[in-house]
Image: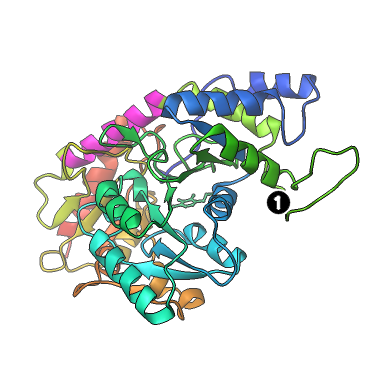
């Protein structure tokens, strides 16, 4: 079976996990947590990074740090995984969904502006935060999004869970907004088995995130609380895995980019198939997942029919994230799009291809051949 994206061992995982166990630091803090944070911070050129138990936890605390409170509205890109917006509900706030633009598949600044002005007109209050996503590793049009956010003075939380190593105009995704979210789930660029991180604007906010993520215990000899806390810190054992994984991070990103380049070359002459690619030199995706879209006027099969044909050949592909405004659980939330519902169109025409950094060139070639025969066989 050729899988979508599998964990890829770097070499030192067992060694570091054994060190963690031998040192009896088998708790949600410790030397490997500090080291992992430092290495992430250096790699990203970020002011501060806090390692957490999941990317979802990082989104939750990013929203808390951005000042989101119960009863607020929070804007979120509709074309994403539900983890981008579930934490809005954890706080008791309400999501407002915004469409994507076709170049990056990420938040449309035009629809964002429309959403903000309409929410102010409707509710009398501006939204409390904006969650923008770098989907499949492709950076969002951050200058345009930030220009609107800055105009209305609304903080931006960047969901870079899929975009570790991607850059936008030379800056790493996750370091451009007020807060940035990373994920180290098993299927991401690097893994800690499960984990995440919040990129913070300064050491002071990082201290606050550490405080909130360890049950908000005040510095007293007894347990004393003035704030609601969370149990969101990364385990030292997981961080040991992360320290091994990050040693190979640049190579992992390069490999995903090489796999994308093979798909671009291999599918270039297939009519009706388009590989989603950096729109210009400002965007440098890590290509966490290579994705393609099918032109309905040329290819009669649906993406799901093609997915099933590939599955029969032992190749795992996945449909595009179903947009949040099309999810029953968010059916009551407002949604802002232009004349064309871009995120729905991408969902209905796209497919994610096997992209894990452990794939061999032969396996990628096999996927390309299988796509060619699936789309020509009518
Ligand atoms: C994986 C992912 C998350 C959540 O990360 P976890 O570590 O699994 O909690 C959030 N947003 C997006 C877009 C993701 O792909």
- Residue that label 1 marks: 230
Main SS type for the magenta part?
A: helix
Residue 229, above or below 192: below
How far across and how far down the image is residue 117, in percent?
Answer: 31, 71
Residue 349 seen in the figure = yes
Residue drawn at (22%, 36%) of the image: 262
How far across and how far down the image is residue 377, in percent?
Answer: 17, 60
Q: How many marks?
A: 1
Q: Nearer the viewer, residue 220 or 17?
A: 220
Residue drawn at (15%, 58%) of the image: 376
Q: Quadrant of residue 111?
A: bottom left
Q: Nearer the viewer, residue 302 or 378?
A: 302
Mark 1 element type = loop
Residue 175: say if magenta.
no
Q: Locate residue 171 relative to residue 276 in the image: left or right.
A: right
As drawn, the residue found furthest toward the right would be 222
Q: Nearer the viewer, residue 29 or 305?
A: 29
Magenta stretch, residue numbers: 250-264
Q: Is label 1 within 8 A of ligand 1 (CB to nearest ligand atom)?
A: no
Residue 192 seen in the figure = no
Residue drawn at (60%, 42%) of the image: 194
- Indicate the quadrant containing the N terminus: top left, top right, bottom left or bottom right: top left
Disc 1: CA contacts within 10 A as few (<14), some (14-19) or many (>=20): some
Q: Quadrant of residue 323?
A: bottom left
- Indicate the quadrant containing the C terminus: top left, top right, bottom left or bottom right: bottom left
Q: Locate residue 259 relative to residue 204 in the image: left or right.
A: left
Residue 254: say if magenta.
yes
How far across and how far down the image is residue 183, in percent?
Answer: 51, 43
Q: Quadrant of residue 236?
A: top right
């Amino acid at each position: 079976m050729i899988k979508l994206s599998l964990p890829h061992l770097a070499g030192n995982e067992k060694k570091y996990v054994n060190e963690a166990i031998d040192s009896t630091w088998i708790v949600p803090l410790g030397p490997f947590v500090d080291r992992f944070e430092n290495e992430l911070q250096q790699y990203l050129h970020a002011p501060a990074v806090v390692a957490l138990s999941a990317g979802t936890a990082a989104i939750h605390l990013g929203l808390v740090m951005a000042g989101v409170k119960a009863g607020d509205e929070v804007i979120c890109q509709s074309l994403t995984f539900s983890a981008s917006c579930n934490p809005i509900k954890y706080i008791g706030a309400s999501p407002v969904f915004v469409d994507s633009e076709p170049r990056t598949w990420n938040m449309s600044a035009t629809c964002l502006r429309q959403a903000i002005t309409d929410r102010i007109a409707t509710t009398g209050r501006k939204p409390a935060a904006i969650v923008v996503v770098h989907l499949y590793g492709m950076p969002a049009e951050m200058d345009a999004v930030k220009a609107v956010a800055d105009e209305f003075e609304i903080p931006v939380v960047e969901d870079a869970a899929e975009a570790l190593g991607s850059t936008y105009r030379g800056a790493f995704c996750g370091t451009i907004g007020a807060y940035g979210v990373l994920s180290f789930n098993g299927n991401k660029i690097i893994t800690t088995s499960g984990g995440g991180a919040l990129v913070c604007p300064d050491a002071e906010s990082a201290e606050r995130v550490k405080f909130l993520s360890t049950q908000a215990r005040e510095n007293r000899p007894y347990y004393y609380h003035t704030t609601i806390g969370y149990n969101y810190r990364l385990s030292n054992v997981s961080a040991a895995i992360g320290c091994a994984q990050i040693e190979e991070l640049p190579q992992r990103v390069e490999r995903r980019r090489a796999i994308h380049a093979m798909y671009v070359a291999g599918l270039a002459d297939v009519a009706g198939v388009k590989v989603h690619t950096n729109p210009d030199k400002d965007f440098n995706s890590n290509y966490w997942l290579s994705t393609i879209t099918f032109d309905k006027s040329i290819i009669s099969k649906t993406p799901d029919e093609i997915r099933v044909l590939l599955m029969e050949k032992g190749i795992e592909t996945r449909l595009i994230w179903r947009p949040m405004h099309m999810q029953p659980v968010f059916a009551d939330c407002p949604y802002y799009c232009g004349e064309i519902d871009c995120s729905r169109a991408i969902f209905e025409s796209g497919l994610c291809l096997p992209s894990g950094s452990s794939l061999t060139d032969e396996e990628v070639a096999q996927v390309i051949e299988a796509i060619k025969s699936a789309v020509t066989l009518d």
